[in-house]
Image (tube, rainbow, N blue to C red):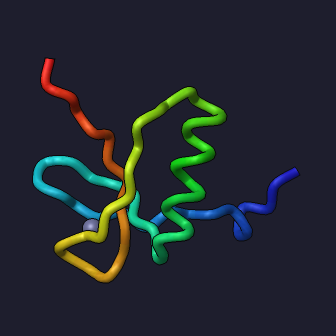
Amino acid sequence: MRNKFQEYEPEKCWVGETQKISYATREEAEMAAKVAEYDHKISGLSVYKCEYGDHWHLTKEKKAS
Ligand SMILES: [Zn+2]
């Protein structure tokens, strides 16, 4: 059973027109990318430093098709 107060509430940040989850450290963002890849089969996520604040985001690189 999960305690409501212990549940992890991710910080969010508006980047352009989308709200993205922000991570305090690069390690945290990289870990989240690994989890997304493993749990949700989302590949190609990369980590970048936010230009609006002192935190990190994940981005899905779009390949021109
Ligand atoms: Zn941000």
Query: In the figure, 1 relative to 3: above or below?
Result: above
Q: Give the residue at x 36% y 75%.
A: 55
- Image side of residue 19 versus residue 64, left or right: right
Residue that extends furthest to the top in the rendered view of this protein: 65
Residue closest to the eye, 55 or 7: 55
Q: Give the residue at x 11% y 54%.
A: 16
- Image side of residue 15 versus residue 22, left or right: left
Quadrant of the image where one finds ligand 1: bottom left
Residue that extends furthest to the bottom in the rendered view of this protein: 54
Q: Give the residue at x 71% y 69%.
A: 5
User: How far across and down, in percent of the image, does residue 32 sit?
Assistant: 56, 53
User: How far across and down, in percent of the image, does residue 44 sit?
Assistant: 40, 37
- Image side of residue 16 versus residue 28, left or right: left
- Image side of residue 62 versus residue 17, left or right: right
Residue 21: image quadrant is bottom left
Residue that extends furthest to the front in the rendered view of this protein: 64
Residue 12: image quadrant is bottom left
Q: Give the residue at x 48% y 76%.
A: 25
User: How far across and down, in percent of the image, does residue 11 sit?
Assistant: 43, 67
Residue that extends furthest to the right in the rendered view of this protein: 1
Query: In the figure, 37 relative to 20: above or below?
Result: above
Number of on-image labels? 0
User: How far across and down, in percent of the image, does residue 63 sit?
Assistant: 21, 29
Residue 57: image quadrant is bottom left
The C terminus - image quarter: top left
